[in-house]
Image (cartoon, rainbow, N blue to C red):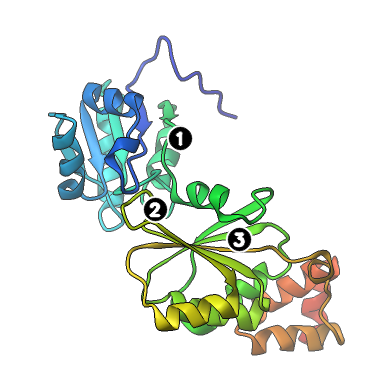
Amino acid sequence: MNIQRSYGKRDSGILYLVPTPIGNLDDMTFRGVKTLQSADLIASEDTRNTQKLLNHFEIKVPQKSFHEHNYRERIPELIRLLQDGQTIAQVSDAGMPSISDPGQELVAACIAENIPVVSLPGATAGMTALIASGLSPQPFYFYGFLQRKKSQQKKELEQLKSQTATLIFYESPHRIKETLKNAEQVLGDRQVVICRELTKLYEEYIRGSVQEVIDYVSEHPLKGECCLLISGANEEVAEEILEGTLTEQVEQLMEEGFSSKEAIKEVAKRNQIKKQEVYKLFHEL
């Protein structure tokens, strides 16, 4: 049990999670700038990238790198500073910290030490793209980055196949075509939207069926980071149950790239039974 009252008398510093613009510096909030200005230290995913932002707003606060390759050794340092009463602002290269960027581990460490964690609202690519996509904004399912390998990616998409929510992914421009092909094979020819260069001069929304968009990107190679949105499953797909015996269902999922353990768990979930029952049947126990 943990109750946090973010403001008022406290025995430590505060960790502020500060969103940064996803392309247009004018999207930086007044509160975000003030928070960075008043911090004792800024924990940055890339100090060189963040320095451009700090220079733009004439912020002189020192930085310390905090990214996926050094977070294990950095967290104890940052926790000690916070316990000594310092205020730390954590930022990623663009958008919200912890969303496909480092940060969650630091947040968890702060909570474990009863150090307040305060999140500021601000720019995030997924929500920005969703509300202008034309696809249903409610419900939505933010997934982030899919695995790069084809077999792993198709397995992830298979697990999302019955989701009725609009699916939101981040993808690089040179992988977007193959991702769309995998999506068509697993999910069918649904409506999709690619949003690229969000908030920048060359912002672009590409809307259509999966096949239409595949044809387009085949002729028009994309540049810039992309946000890919895919319409959710209709009710008939959402209610789909794998065919055959439980053992045959497990084997079917294994052919699609699932491990036996993952397939047993998924079959149990889809058939609403205990996974131990599926395990015993599959292993003939």
Cα separation between marks 2 and 3: 18 Å
Q: Assign a secondary structure to mark 2.
A: loop
Residue tagged by mark 1? Answer: 112
- In percent of width and height, residue 256 lies at 64, 86
> Would you place residue 176 above or below residue 70 in this image?
below
Q: Residue furthest top?
A: 9
First of labels 3, 1 by sequence position: 1
Return the residue at label 2: 198
Residue 165 placement: quadrant: bottom right
Depth check: 169 or 132 in front? Answer: 132
Check disc 3 and report the residue beneath it.
Answer: 167
Look at the image and tell me whether residue 234 can be seen: yes
Marks 1/2 in contact by CB < 8 Å: the verdict is no
Q: Residue at x 46, y 33 (%)?
A: 111
In front: label 1 or label 2: 2
Name the kind of residue labelled 1 in the image. Ala
